[in-house]
C-alpha cells in the first residue's frame, strides 16, 4: 500500500513540475509555455518601434530554472 501511495505522489509531483501552462501575450502572437522547472517562449512580435523600418521577430527562447539555454529569436 505504501508503494502505491509513493508512486502516486511521484506522479503528481512530476505533473506539477513538468506540465506547462500556455499563456498568450498581447504582442502580436507570442505564446509562453510556463512550468515550474522550465519556460518556452514561441516568439512572434514586432521589434523596436523607434527604428526606421519595423522589424518582425520570430524564434524560440528556452529557459531552465530561470537561466536562458537557447535563443533563436531573429
Image (cartoon, helix red, strand yellow):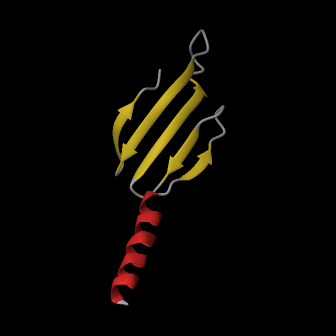
For this orientation, the residue located farthest to the bottom is 1
Q: Is residue 63 above or below residue 60?
A: below
Q: Residue at x 47, y 55 (%)?
A: 35
59 and 26: which one is in front?
59
- Residue 70: image quadrant is top left
The front one of 23 and 27 is 23
- Relative to 24, residue 13 above or below: below
Q: Specify whether 38 is left or right of 42.
A: left
Image height of 45 relative to 50, above or below: below
Image position of 65 (left or right of 23): left
The picture places residue 72, in percent across and down from the top left corner, at 42, 26
> Residue 45, image x and y in percent?
60, 28
At which x and y percent is residue 74?
47, 20
Instruction: Please tell me which residue lies in front, 48 or 28.
Output: 28
Total marks drawn? 0
The residue shown at (66%, 39%) is 26
In this view, 29 is above or below 23 = above
- Quadrant for the N terminus, please: bottom left
Q: Residue at x 56, y 13 (%)?
A: 51
**Residue at image point 45% right, 47% down:** 39
Residue 53's x, y, as percent? 60, 10
Amino acid at each position: 500500500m505504501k508503494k502505491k501511495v509513493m508512486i502516486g505522489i511521484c506522479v503528481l509531483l512530476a505533473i506539477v513540475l513538468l506540465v506547462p501552462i500556455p499563456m498568450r501575450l498581447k504582442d502580436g502572437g507570442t505564446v509562453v509555455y510556463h512550468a515550474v522547472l522550465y519556460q518556452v517562449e514561441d516568439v512572434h512580435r514586432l521589434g523596436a518601434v523607434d527604428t526606421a523600418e519595423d522589424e518582425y521577430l520570430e524564434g524560440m527562447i528556452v529557459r531552465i530554472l530561470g537561466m536562458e539555454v537557447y535563443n533563436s529569436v531573429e
